Amino acid sequence: MPPPVDSEEEPRFALRGRIVTMDPHDTVLDDGVLYIGRGLIDAVLPAGAPRPPGHEDTPVVRTGGTVYPGLIELHNHLPYDVLPLWRIPRRYGNRSDWGGRVNPAYRTLVTGPMTVLGEDPGLMPAVVRYVEAKALVNGTTTSQGIALFSNTGSRRMYRGIVRNVEATDDPALPEAASRIADVEAADARRFLTRLQQPHRLLLHLAEGTDEEARGHFQALEFERGRWAITDNLVGIHCTGLSAEDFTVFAGHGGSMVWSPLSNLLLYGRTADIAAARRTGMLIGLGSDWSVSGSKGLLGELKAARLASAAAGGVFGDRDLVAMATRDAAAILRWEHALGSLRPGMRADLVAVAGADGDPYTALIDARDRDIVLVAIDGVPRYGTTALMRKLTPDHGELEPLTDGAPARRSVRLRQTSADPVVGGLTLTEAAERLSRALADLPGLAERAARRAPPPADEGPRWRLALDEIEPNGTELRPRLAPRGAARQARPGPSGPEIAPPAAGAAALTALALDGLTAGGDPGFLASLAAEPNLPPDYAAELSDLLT
């Protein structure tokens, strides 16, 4: 299978600046040089040290800032990141209360638009291109992947520029899963057997704050003292867990993905992070999706700092940066290849302007305009046009960015092994297609309903495999029945009842494409300020950090 990026073709280069390694000793070089060749970090040395072998003639490029490992996101429904922030009308108790059939607004704002975009042969590629570039612009180098279905019944993961935790093509990066078969999700013993396979499972767990949400965690105890939990279970959200539950979860090896902004927007509170920390469990971060979350990990780090402060200062800034780098890598069992800047590691990195003050605080304080470089496998993918031109042999591969991005930035999306679903589509063209489509959703739905089905002999025609819009034989969460119905307000599976896939024009309204960055999207900031479930002053403080 071809590599997802083109590191073998890249020349050697070196970056000079403050180097925050995130290694086990928290080594920080105030003035260091990161030497990179063939997608790997060859050396991390003080600026005055002799060059390493093979780099005698390597150009050293000054970043004018601080270099960190690339940000590893453990939870994001990427295809939905074209949709604007939802002004959530009330506080919900659990995931079943606001998604699927129970909430007509969910169809208007989420499932209806995504059904139209995801099935249109001209718009689906634009979604894929836009959301992947959006991740880059916000410093993310690894995220959950984008699943595709075809009219022939095939399913695969989109292979693009941003690393995909579910399809790595790299033996040093064990693949995780974020979906399991229906039958495994609903049967405790089969679920446990699935957990005993050598793969991490990133699954939604206890989504909400009421007893029903907690009951779906308690259902993992399928016999007295026997839990369907191993170190392969990575629980996403965990907002319904008590301190006792976290002790059980961590005691069986479980870890957590924290999405504080989404939790606060939907439920008015987030996970009991103080209890989680006391267990010593590993915690990663995820921005969830643009419907009820941050633009990306750079924003979610800020949301996490505010949530931590509100809980009594549970985490310091170094702890939070670790959640998006080395701790996230450890959750995936990638710590020997990613998550820190050390010789022999994959060259995924993000650099931000400036090299003063606390090195960990500097990353969380950084605005989107402060990101000067993002590289994956040693391939510069986004950054200031000046830096990208110094690091990219063929300047024709660079696409200058305009609307919604910081000034004088370029993105590099060319791949020798480009997925044919997207091919040579530019970010600018993708954004234009999506903007026009979202402004005309009712019309698109009407035309889609009249469109004749493609010929049977046309060959594979790919569309987005969208979570919780139509049944597809897999689940995003355990759906185990509790041992006693009294332990749960409404016994039954976790998560929403899936809505029908049809997206009638009457159910839709015009929407705006969600902007690439918080600083370039005044609509996002206005919606954030109007959200009713956030704690007092939280929206204003977060907006200040973002802009």
Image (cartoon, grey):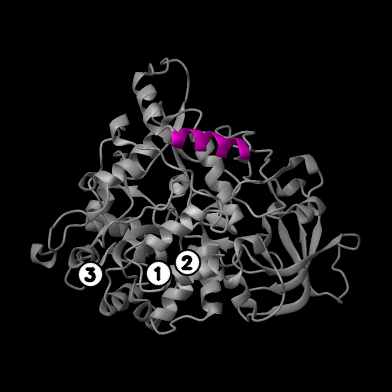
Q: Amino acid at mark 3?
A: Arg
Residue 412 x/y as whole percent: 69, 46
Image vertical order of residue 182 relative to residue 204, above or below: above
Q: Quadrant of the N terminus?
A: top right
Q: Residues within 10 Å of mark 3 (few under 14, many from 20)?
A: few
Gap between marks 2 and 3, in whole Å?
Answer: 23 Å
Bounds of the magenta segment: 428-439
Which disc is residue 226 wearing? 3
Which element type, helix, strand or loop, lies under badge 1? strand
The front one of 174 and 327 is 327
Residue 130, by quadrant, is top right
Q: Nearer the viewer, residue 229 or 193?
A: 229
- State the separation of the CA atoms marked 1 and 3: 18 Å
Magenta stretch holds residue 435 = yes
Q: Please give the name of the residue rendered at 31% of the width and 68% of the height, measured from the top-left corner.
A: 268
Name the N-terminal-most of marks 2 and 3. Answer: 3
Q: Residue 334: in sight, yes or no?
A: yes
| Whether label 1 touches label 2, CB < 8 Å | yes
The picture places residue 444, in percent across and down from the top left corner, at 41, 28
Q: Which residue is mark 2?
A: 331
What is the number of the mark on residue 401? none
Magenta segment's dominant SS is: helix
Residue at 67% in and 46% down: 401
Against 484, residue 496 (above or below) is: above
- Residue receiving disc 1: 255
- Helix or strand or loop: what does disc 3 sit on? strand
